[in-house]
Amino acid sequence: MGVVYHGNYAQFFEIGRIEWLRALDISYKKMEENNTMLPVISLQCNFKKSAHFDDEITIKTTLKKTPTVKIEFDYEIHNQFGDLLCTGNTVLAFVAMDTKKPMRCPDYLLKILGD
């Protein structure tokens, strides 16, 4: 069809989150090595226009509020012409990898976000 499959937008949001963390000098891999995982518990997507094959997209990722046991992000995806293609939101839970139980946001992340 020449347009991006709608399921790919969840992956675009994930890329946005990983890059948002990386910009703060936080590695998701290191979070996991420190017993923290972030499963998605809510995903919402509003499609405005189609992304097409070979479009260059920009993913704007914004932290919605200070994290607690959950962390919430808003997204905007634009094409190379500046057209708004999609808006979205995800909520992820902080979970201890060893117990699989919810946990509070790690102190080191709160410290970085507070600076």
Image: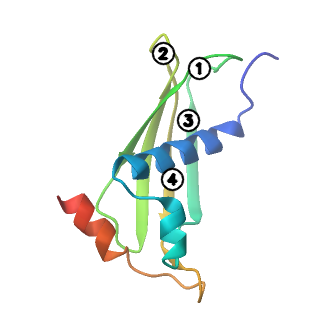
Residue 90's disc is: 4
Earlier residue among tags 2 and 3: 3
- Residue 79 x/y as whole percent: 52, 18
Element assignment for label 2: loop
- Residue 2 x/y as whole percent: 78, 15
- Whether residue 107 is visible: yes
Distance Cα–Cα, label 2 vs label 1: 8 Å
- Residue 112 x/y as whole percent: 25, 61
From the viewer's side, name the closer residue of 66 and 55: 55
Query: What residue is disc 3 on?
Result: 46
Of circles 4 and 3, the one toward us is 4
Query: What residue is disc 1 on?
Result: 49
Q: Amino acid at mark 3?
A: Asn
Callout 4–callout 3 Cβ contact below 8 Å? no
From the viewer's side, name the closer residue of 79 and 64: 79
* Residue at image coords 57%, 64%: 41
- Residue 113 x/y as whole percent: 25, 59
Distance Cα–Cα, label 2 vs label 4: 22 Å
Residue 83's disc is: 2
Q: Amino acid at mark 4?
A: Thr
Q: Amino acid at mark 1?
A: Lys
User: In this picture, is 13 found above or below 58?
Assistant: below
Earlier residue among tags 2 and 4: 2
